[in-house]
Amino acid sequence: MDIEDTLLMIPGPVRVPQRVLRAMSKPMISHRSSDFEKIYEECRSRLRELFETENEAVILSGSGTAGMEAAVGGIIGKDDKIITVTNGKFGERFTELGNRYGTAVLLEFPWGTPYDLERIEAALEEGAKAISIVHNETSVGIVNPAKEVGELARRHDAIFIVDGISSVGGNEFLTDEWGIDIAITGSQKCLALPPGLAMVTVSKRAAEMLEDGKGGYYTDLKAHLDKAKKNQTPYTPAVSLFFALQEALIMAEEEGLAERRARMARLAKGVREAASALDIDLFPQVNEHSAYSNTVTAMKTPEGITDGQLRGGMRERGVVVSGGQSALKGKIFRIGTMGACTEADVLRTIQTLELVLLKEGLISSLGAGVEAASRAMER
Ligand code: PLP
């Protein structure tokens, strides 16, 4: 099937709206011009609204991981410890970064299970300069308790770093209220632009810890922050992606930030209800301190069908969904509902899933999933 007719339902990169694509085709400008500075200033101001913060916002040309590296490299030196809380793939990345720049104290929970806040508090009592969490763990579809961990971090005077890469703009994300010192998002997720930008907010407290020449060179958070205050960048930025970001942030404001999050919540609920109607189990286990994600739903691959048959069958019919990562390869599949995703996109995805399940003999008639999703997504 032609790529233009394919429905991309993975948890990022996501479909990019035409308006954003058109913005990217604008003629190039000098990144040292006042025109660029105006765009950067506008983006920084709109990002503060998106992150719900008064903190400084910085934009790095690089994928979300560049933002994670800037955060950890800026705060953690070779004699420092960072507690890295993990219940999925992206938490592990913080551990690797922590060990690259200093020492990571890994606090690991089985993938897709909730954090144990008592264990987190006990680790903080041992002393650490910082603690990192992944708010929306994309690999397993769980939302972790940023507010609660933020309270613990503040009580123990640790810098609180939160990966909000697949969360900011999709799930509730209250940077200031939750005491997040460094928050990160990526362009290819809820904002629905192509991959290539990392947006980072930095509290005063965290900014004071940054030092010249510490951390990575290209991802030096101090260098980026110092320049950002003048709406400039240390190195040549991905200018066309800044055009895209400006347009995407305007579109988000037009829709309304709360309405946009509510849309994604409705779509994810549609997917979950369809799964239930089709006897497909959700993967994450949630408790009172965690939640199902609004931006990605992870489901167990049903008995009697392989991952290749399920996702391959869907792909042949024009719908691309994600599989599991690392140890979850072949065991789960994931449907993204972030960015510009619509109710019609979810219905086509569920209908396609049903066709595949019918072909493989797992269901005997069509329609239960589509009906459940339709009802769940009704406003
Ligand atoms: N953290 C989370 C929660 C993610 O979902 C991703 C990407 O999927 C990353 C980090 C890594 O971001 P990137 O691939 O943009 O570097």
Image (cartoon, rainbow, N blue to C red):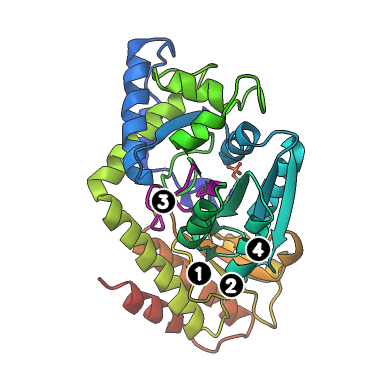
Tell me the residue at 68%/67% (across/down). Answer: 109
Q: Nearer the viewer, residue 46 or 207?
A: 207
Residue 213 in percent (x, y) is at 65, 20
Whether residue 248 can be seen here = no
State left or right for residue 142 relative to residue 310.
Answer: left
Residue 331 lies, in percent from the top left, at: 70, 71
- Contact flag, marks 3 and 2 (Cβ < 8 Å): no
State the image coordinates of residue 274 (x, y, percent, origin top left). 46, 78
Q: Which residue is mark 1?
A: 290
Residue for badge 3: 339
The Cα atoms of the two marked residues, 1 and 3, are separated by 22 Å
* Residue type beneath disc 1: Ser
Q: Report which residue position mark 4 lands on.
A: 122
| Earlier residue among tags 3 and 4 | 4
Dot 4 lies on which element?
helix
User: Which amino acid, by three-letter code, is at mark 4?
Assistant: Ala
- The magenta stretch is 159-185
Q: Which residue is labeled 2 in the image?
A: 284
Callout 3, which amino acid?
Gly
Task: Report the Cα–Cα distance between label 1 and label 2.
Answer: 10 Å
The label nearer to you, 1 versus 4, is 4
Q: Quadrant of residue 228?
A: top left
